[in-house]
Image (cartoon, rainbow, N blue to C red):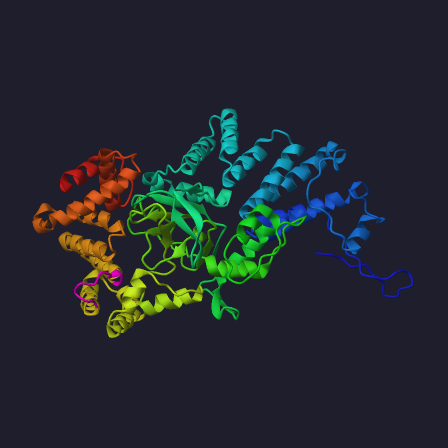
Amino acid sequence: ESTRGGGGAGGGGGVARVEEPAAADLKARGNARFKEGKFGEAFLAYSRAIARMNLERLEELQPPLDIATPQDVLDAAIPIPDDFDPALHAAALQDPETADLFYALLANRAAVAARLGLFRRALTDVEAALVVRPGDARARLRKAQVLTRLQRYEEALEMWKELGGEFPKDRDVKKMADKVRRRMQEAGGVFDFFAVDSEDTERAKLGAALGGEEYADFVGPIEVVEIAGKGRGVVASHDISKGTLLLCDRALVVAASERRAETVAINERRQQLNTDSQIRAVSELVQRMKDDDEFARRVYNLHAGDAEKPPLDGEGKIPVDHLFVQSAVEFNAFRPQPIPRVADPVVGPSGGDTAGMTGVWSRASMFNHSCVPNTTRNSAGESLMIFATTDIREGEEITVAYCPKEASLAKRTDVCEQFGFRCTCELCEYQRTTASENIELRGQLLEAWEEDIMPKLMKESSTKALEPVLLFLDKLNTTYAPDSPYEFEKVEILDLLGMLYEEREQYSLARQHYTRAYRASGGRDPRFCKLVYRAIVCGSMDEFDESSAPETERLLDELDALYALRAGGDLVAAQRMVARDVSISEAGGWDEDADEAERARRMRK
């Protein structure tokens, strides 16, 4: 990619000289890398091309450089700015060919920057492209996309409306204006979870163009305070009802392993392994921090153990400390939650398989841990949502689980120790004072389930899998006292049994096991309320056991109440939504015909 000159006339082995390719050649290289999906290399090629064009205006650069020629600048490794300065190129832009080249470089780099998550850089470049070509529709379209991604919704909506007026037949522009209006509603806490599934495909298409279209950020009735013995934490700013959306937070970064089997790197400082996706998350955060000081401040606001952040009040760009970023990822990363089997307005929407993924959310990282949290979290693309799973009093701490509450005491203790604390939640204290042999046996059974039994069952049909699961549940039951208040470890087993009975069309047994799963969750997993309803809808009245009617109705009343939160308190509208949503999930897709919803309501009555 570079040429080196030989010695002078005397032939004494002269100094090697590097000749920078022409800007047009660098643009072609960037275009080729973009098509190959090598966005980082494309970004560098476009930047080098812009710097090359700046270099050609060397004598006009401010401050002036005491160098004779552009080649001397290259040989001396003096950095040349790769930002566009319209005053510097005012004369050159009178030439249409030069103007076209500058426009293409700026517009293309804006597109690549958006793919890399460098949205502020993308906005700077697209605004520069509009200086070269004022009013250009393509550049304005890209600017509207970037403003949408930066959550500058009012500005974005004005641009989409203008573009819609100019191109009234362009349905995509109208859809984007409608989507921005929905994002503005979401920023005020109004989320339409019942329309999520119908948008999934559309969101995915937009995500490819916009770097990932997500929900708007929203902060509910919560506040960050100092909590004795814990440092920062989150409490309720007023009384909160079960099912309330507390937070919707777009990720600082979500990184996925590009390898089939995720690799690891040894972290000697914390005596643990960092995954490939964690390493990629660190790399992407560092890249964005170098480009965006405001973003860097958000990263430096994360807890990072004993890692020290650099001074943030000096002049010039904020420095990037790689060790701090690595530690911040280790302490704050979540794996995005996989999709629930039945979408729920409390659990919220979710992405698909998230194995091998690491995400960091700045606001969500403020929540402290409890093995019995009063919230549940779920992800939709890069957005993470946190919902209340119990009523929460004003001033009460709001917690999330850093590890599954159904995990054994030993495993939960190990996870908490990796984060540098000992969990003293009600579940851990209860299990530490319970007969140790029961807890130890339960841990052994759960380990065998996870590592041996479950992988084998995944290969079996529902007919063959049922008996081994029932036998395992019997063994697990022996480790609990008759009056045990905590049975979280049973939830996954009971959920699986409900699913197996559904596959066998034994809906009464499915409903019974979903009800038991809800009970085992401590009433904190409303997904099972919907599964109970679905089992009723799919079954027949002949199967219904009247003795279980009161508890079943209580679960369904709770489901109505949760939906009523999304229907402005209108219980009748909420019941219609429940019936329609359950009938839709049972059918496996969106059905505009109301017959199924009517059938669901009649069956419930």
Q: Residue at x 19, y 49 (%)?
A: 532
Quarter holding the N terminus is bottom right
What main secondary structure does the magenta stretch of the protein show?
Answer: loop
- Asked which quadrant contains residue 501, the reply is bottom left
Q: Residue at x 63, y 33 (%)?
A: 130
**Is-magenta flag for residue 481?**
yes
**Is-magenta flag for residue 356?**
no
In this rendering, position of residue 21 left or right of residue 236: right
Depth order, front residue of 328/436: 436
Task: State the extent of the magenta-drawn residues as a range.
Answer: 480-489
In this rendering, position of residue 436 left or right of residue 3: left
Q: Residue 421 in the image: state x and y as whole percent.
A: 42, 64
Asked if residue 502 can be seen in this view, the reply is no
Asked if residue 484 can be seen in this view, the reply is yes
Q: Residue 272 in the image: state x and y as whole percent.
A: 47, 69
In this rendering, position of residue 133 left or right of residue 215: right
In this rendering, position of residue 254 left or right of residue 189: right
Q: Residue 226 in the image: state x and y as whole percent.
A: 45, 52
Q: Residue at x 50, y 24 (%)?
A: 165
As displayed, is residue 581 above or below residue 36? above
Q: Residue at x 53, y 69 (%)?
A: 269
